[in-house]
Image (spheres, coloured by chain):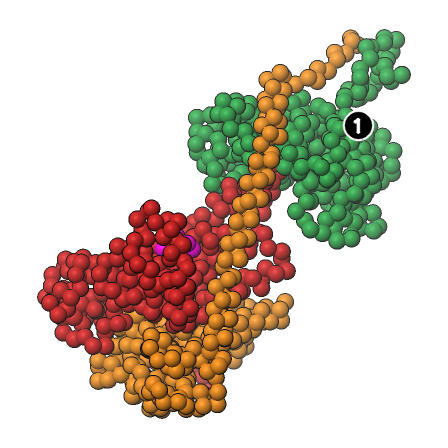
Chain colours: A red, B green, C orange
Amino acid sequence: MSLPDNGYRTMLAVAAVIVGALAVWLVVAIVIQAHPAFVTLGYSWILQKTWDPSHGKYGLLPFILGTLESTAIAVVLAVPIGLGTALALAYLVPHRIRPVLSTAVELLAAVPSVVYGLWGLVVLAPLFRTTVEPFLTAVLGWTGLFNGPNGGVGLLLAGVILFVMILPTMVAISRDVLAVVPNEQLEGAMALGATRWQVLHKVVVPGARTGILGAFTLATGRALGETVAVAMVIGNSPYIAHSLKSPAATLPSLIVNNFGESSGTELAALFGAGLVLLIIGISVNSLARWLVWSTSGGNSQAGPR
Amino acid sequence: MIEAEATGARVEEGVAVYGDEVVVDQPEPKVVMTLADVAVAFGGRTAVRDVTFDVHAGEVTALIGPSGSGKTTLLRALNRMHDTVRTAAVTGTVQLGDLDVYAPSTDPTLLRSRVGMVFQRPNPFPTMSIYENAVAGLKFNGVRKKSLLDEAAESALVGAALWDSVKDRMKAHASTLSGGEQQRLCIARALAVEPEVLLMDEPTSALDPIATKRIEELVVELKDRVTIIIVTHNMQQAMRVSDRCAFLLMGEDKAGELIEFGPTATLFSEPTDPRTLDYVNGRFG
Amino acid sequence: MTILELPVEQPVDATMERRRAIQVAASSSLRRRKLSSGIALGVCWAFLGIAIIPLIAVLIYVTAKGLPAWSVDFFTQSTTPEGIPGGGVWNAIVGTVEITLIAVAATVPLGLMCGLFLAESNGWIAATLRFTADVMTGVPSITVGIFGYIAIVKNFGGYSGLAGAFAIGFIMLPVITRAGETAIRGVPQSLNEAALALGARRATIARRVVVPTALPGIITGVLLAVARGLGETAPLLLTIFGNQYLQWNPTKPMEALPILIYNDSSQPYADLVQVAWGAALLLMVVVLILSIGSRLFAARLQKERR
């Protein structure tokens, strides 16, 4: 015996309210828990550069920088490689193997982050220490970015692992927006005597640029919020990194490493870090959604990826 | 020659005779493109076949016939647009001057700088300005000199009767133009490369009657500058703009074939083939 | 009749000049343009190769290192401290499965009802909710963990499987809601109208017509959400804390596969690292099967619909 229509509608509305309330509750809860830190420490503590709870210092700057730097490495790699892959999948790969390859790239997103962390720590770190880092130091040492010992774990490895993790996001969305550039524009360019690359470079990519920007933003958001894989390979040093090879730490890795044992002001500071992370994550994600949403012609059906 | 015949002169040994007067020998316009036994098939299924005719310089040649008769397929074979379709196979010979269009040594990109195309729906590049659209073809072909780009763009926009309306807003986006203006921009874009032949695939079917009239006038004006081959499903349009017509019809094997080719006036008044007669009398559309 | 003028067929000189200049530029630059095109396209192909390599590398390594860890004991015994042989991951499996099931049991009905709500309304309230759900997917997982800690651990005095289920549920909720909405919107309106015309109540229609028709899409969404939830570690670290022993009671701290991997991977004891690899392989296999399975399922449902 089913509910009468009114009861049914109410039940659905209640469900919707619960979901909305959960989201709001999260924000409120974190703000409340972080509040004591701001009361005790003011507002500038976020940007201090020393994190030393035993001496009452809770500067978050090293972690903010670590978050930004590891994300930057990942994005610098993911944008060109992701775009190139997306172009290949949308226009170069023969139709028949297109779904297989697309799925293979997308499956990268399915691998749990902790597995990436394990792989990075046990397999890639030694490789970086013995081969990759010496090579890069030899070739690019002049930039001043590769000073210091070859440690294996550190910013560079974290950036590379993040790159692998955000690549599927960049590729999948870019591929979708690149593929729907109207065929008539491609034909128009072809008929003028453009080479294949000219068509892609001057017509297809510009035509998809808003969606690509959305993909880039979404991928950046993913990298900023990634916790476990980064925590496992970044070395967890609370100091500002001076080289790509240095160990470092990010806001998420700070929280996950110290949450269990901390209390009082330190705990409140961690909540504050969580709040900062939440604000960054939501802003970047909203921006990305808006960008992607506005390219698909306002199609609000596009689900989360 | 065509005008002479159309005005009722008799042609004797290449000379037009009006009554008792002998007129100076008018040479046939030079042939700029020849088609011989051209056929296009997709995955074994023939779409159009047995097409043989010559395209004369400085004229408008129309491909006419009911829908499905392979006119567009044939047109697109002339600038090798079927190259990107894996299942497409083009047989026969297409010659542009002394260039064999389908020879392995012929580069399609270079070919398309000599044979331009305008499409059914206006397709200006949306992320580019009016100026950038106009010079897009030139840039694709490696032209870098600003003076040449500017000169070609202006000449093309003048030729497309668009110069006066856009000369003060060359940086505006192409999307700010109306449908008819966009199509004229596409025509200018194709003209800027100074092709020898311009292929037009039903260029007015997506436009309103006024814009259509403008473009038809343009086609007639432009034929001195570039030879035009136009596909149209509108008989009256063919009569208004073209010098010669090729009439195609779908055969029983579902493949289009060339039924008749000749001067427009003749084709419409005294066609050789009865099927042509039926078509021009509107017995099927 | 007068003498007909010869038609002048030569184009204007400037045009010929331009044509010649353009053709010269075109043919002289042809080689360069074709070379650039070839190189650029080659780079795209190379990048595609680079994109595929990590997946293959991870699959190979995890399998190579994890497979040796698999044994009967591995699947049936709980974890043992370092040095003591015979340990397994049974307690982690139990924990993972329980938490996931609880999360699914809570999230699917809620998400589905929310999806129904969104599918049936189009006002600004629905638009805001939809946007909220989308933004929820962008909340960093550690923040979700913090939320789970605040909401459950703090309030109920201790780490528990339920707190973990809460956090994982929060992560799964937007995925199921959006997938549900999309699937339900895909149900032809005609079915709805026919049922209404027959006098059925909306609740009945939803239960008997809409949801069953949208079920394949919903199931795909649920599978994807589960795959996503299984891979999350950070929220669990802050909520269920981990447990060396087998624990069936979800109100107590529990162990889960991701936590086990995270903790054991950095240990200096080789046998613990070995267990971590084994667990990683298990987790990866399950998640990949779910992901590929949901794709195949979705593809088959597309075909059947045609």
Return the residue nearer the eye: C221 or C277: C277
Quadrant hosting residue B98: top right
Q: Is residue A271 left or right of residue C226?
A: left
**Viewport quadrant of the N terminus of chain C:** top right
**Position in image of residue A229 (x %, y %):** 36, 68
Percent across and percent down for residue C145 are: 29, 73
Circle 1 SS class: strand
**Magenta residues (range):** A73-78
| Magenta-drawn stretch contains A75 | yes
Q: Residue at x 38, y 85 (%)?
A: C92
Determine which quarter of the picture holds residue C143: bottom left
Residue B256 in view of the camera: yes
Is residue B283 or residue B172 the one in the foreground?
Answer: B172
Q: Residue at the spot x=47%, y=76% of the render?
A: C65
Q: Residue at x 82, y 13 (%)?
A: B25
Above or below — where is C84 with respect to B219? below
Residue B235 visible in the shown view? no
Which quarter of the rendered picture does the C terminus of chain C lie within? bottom right
Can you identify the residue that label 1 sits on?
Answer: B263
Q: Quadrant of residue B62?
A: top right
Badge 1 sits on which subunit?
A: B
- Image coordinates of residue C179 in percent, x first then y, are 46, 69
Is C87 within the magenta? no
Label the magenta part by its dominant secondary structure: helix
